[in-house]
Amino acid sequence: MYIGPAGENKVRIASIMAKLTHAAGYGGYGTVMGSKNLKAIVVKGTKSLPKIADLESFKKLLQYVHRQYFERTFFLELWELARVDTLLVQNRVANQ
């Protein structure tokens, strides 16, 4: 996990990035890391991940969750509402 220039400069909405495509952007977590002069956290395990007891059932569950989340307009509408609400809150905090 790492931060970029926004976190280093303590911008209130700075994200924490993981790999190249994953981000924890809500809440300004990158700002917290930047305020502590912490630019990155690296963890390397030495043991393997635990085995999944029933791999086929797990795959079916992942497919089901994916369908429920991405193929239903209800969830897409909730996602849009959450994004709008978050922007309104961030705007309110920034203008205090």
Image (cartoon, helix red, strand yellow):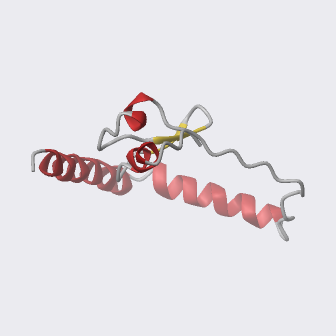
Q: Quadrant of residue 95?
A: top left
For the N terminus, give its image quadrant: top right
Q: Is residue 64 above or below residue 71?
A: below
**In front of the other: 18 or 66:** 18
Which residue, as the protein is rendered here, is positioned at the far bottom? Answer: 53
Which residue is drawn at the image coordinates 42% and 28% (left, top)?
5
Image coords of residue 70 (percent x, y): 47, 49
Image coords of residue 45 (percent x, y): 82, 53
Q: Quadrant of residue 18?
A: top right
Which residue, as the protein is rendered here, is positioned at the far left? Answer: 96
**In front of the other: 61 or 49:** 49
Which residue is drawn at the image coordinates 38% and 33% (left, top)?
6
Which residue, as the protein is rendered here, is positioned at the far right? Answer: 47
Q: Is residue 79 above or below residue 11?
A: below
Label tally:
0
Which residue is drawn at the image coordinates 87% and 64% (left, top)?
51
**In front of the other: 14 or 54:** 14
Which residue, as the protein is rendered here, is positioned at the far top? Answer: 5
**In front of the other: 69 or 1:** 1
Image coords of residue 15 (percent x, y): 42, 41
On the picture, is 68 further left or further right than 75?
right
Q: Is residue 65 above or below residue 12?
A: below
Image coords of residue 73 (percent x, y): 35, 51
On the picture, is 93 further left or further right than 22?
left
Q: Is residue 78 above or below residue 5?
A: below
Which residue is drawn at the image coordinates 59% and 31% (left, top)?
20
